[in-house]
Image (spheres, rainbow, N blue to C red):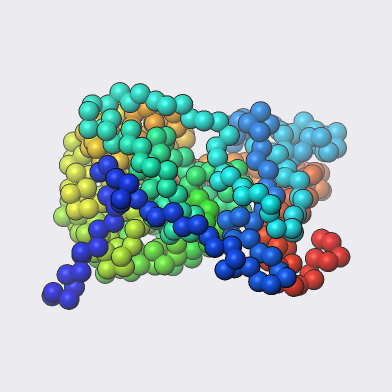
Amino acid sequence: MDSYDICLWRPLPLNQEITPSSSLPTVSPQTEDIETKGVPVTPPNEIDYSYKLSAPSELTPPGSVTPQESASTEGSVCGEDSASSDDSASTAPSEDGALAEPEIAVELKPETETPEPAKPEREIPEVVVGAPEPATVAVQIRAPEVYDAFAPAATRLRHMIKNSSHIIKCPGVYDGLSARVAIQVGFEGMYMTGAGTTASRLGQADLGIAQLHDMRTNAEMIANLRPDGPPLIADMDTGYGGPIVIAKAVQQYHLAGVAAFHIEDQVIQKRCGHLSGKEVVDVETYIQRIKACKVAASQLRSDIIVIARTDALQSRGYDECIERLRRARDEGADMGILEGVQTKEQAAQAVKDLAPWPLCYNSVENGHSPLITAQEAQEMGYRVIIFSFASIAPAYVAIKSTFEWLKEMGTTGSSVTPKTIFNVCGLSESMVIDEASGGTAFSKGV
Ligand SMILES: C[C@](O)(C(=O)O)[C@H](CC(=O)O)C(=O)O
């Protein structure tokens, strides 16, 4: 028994103030170590991939096309470039959704200047948190500026949660392209939605159909697009089994490079948290799940962040949810999610009731919860906000309206070039690698 008692590893807790001595050491990449003679290579996080962030003024509000509007707008093609579309297509909403098409200007020369780490375009204003004392402390922690791009994503996310005064906004991504767009736009973190993974990989509804293999392979691909990029929070549903399977799931997510995951208390035959008729397991079974996560993470010496989610609101009420989350917290869960909150007041109350334990808000627009913006969630004291449907919903709208147009007109009317997509998906990264390796794959252009 003793040999299994290896829970000595204690990752940095998220609900305690950190001191400089517990901060990550800053690693300055040794450029000369990775420079080969005659083939100048910059460290991975210093390569100029020549991506340009869109200016906020160029952005079209993503909510500007609702599924209803799209269905009823004959001939409109979501995601088309009106400037270069033909007459009929020019009625369509502006191109690339919210994205200005990046000019591909592949720079194969080594950088002369060290690039700034991606920063949000607009500073998020400092907020005064209206929560009671402990929550205020948890939210206002400002640790020293330490950020190591080479640290595991889990470690980086832990430090981001501890060290930033603003809420970490994570768009839901469900495949490589949506994740690439999140990286291109410059998000600090990403969220792999189980609903979106199930819909896109399996063509199925969020009913517990996706299994560990489906989820892990998707998460692994997304997390490794840019290992030094935005940390990935991934859905782990119910953990896909009992404690042994859950421990395997944690191991697989850890090895996949996932920074954080949430595990819930629904029965294995679960459903989306924003559907009615959810059933939850008893508290002891839920706590077993959390313990299994912590044992596995501990064995792996992993910083992976365990987010305990409860779906008990519908069937057991608010107080039992808070009790479940408290128990999960006491078992070492790093963060909590109260799924499907019914009112803004309830969302704010949960932060207060669980303070200083950090909470993540799951924003499912048009789901069972009220619309809460990132700013509002920040003011309530939430530390992370995930927007589960942020890519799958607009993708559906765009694909459907384009297909309707194609069916009618015999052409998509699209102005997006193949290169636009390839650029987002790392064309220039591949070119840099080829050039630096002495390859000539792109010597005649691309
Ligand atoms: C967060 C979630 O687990 C997801 O898979 O994205 C879903 C989102 C949804 O299906 O509405 C959930 O909230 O259960």
Quadrant holding the C terminus: bottom right
Residue 427 appearing in the image: no
Residue at x 34% of width, y 58% of height: 303
Count of numbered circles on the image: 0
Q: Identify whether 287 is placed above or below 36.
A: above
Q: Identify whether 438 is placed above or below 311.
A: below
| Left or right side of 203 for 215 | left
Q: Nearer the viewer, residue 304 or 73?
A: 304
Q: Nearer the viewer, residue 308 or 203?
A: 308
Residue 133 appearing in the image: yes
Q: Quadrant of residue 66?
A: top right
Residue at the left extreme of this rendering = 1
Q: Identify whether 244 is placed above or below 132.
A: below
Q: Identify whether 235 is placed above or below 389.
A: below
Residue at x 47% of width, y 35% of height: 365
Quadrant holding the N terminus: bottom left
| Left or right side of 260 for 416 | right
Q: Nearer the viewer, residue 403 or 421?
A: 421
Residue at x 59% of width, y 62% of height: 31
Q: Quadrant of residue 287?
A: bottom left
| Left or right side of 127 for 69 | right
Percent coordinates x, y for residue 441 in the rendering = 79, 70
Q: Nearer the viewer, residue 406 or 182?
A: 182
Residue at x 44% of width, y 58% of height: 151
| Left or right side of 237 for 321 | left
Percent coordinates x, y for residue 307 in the rendering = 32, 50
Percent coordinates x, y for residue 364 in the rendering = 44, 38
Percent coordinates x, y for residue 301 in the rendering = 30, 65
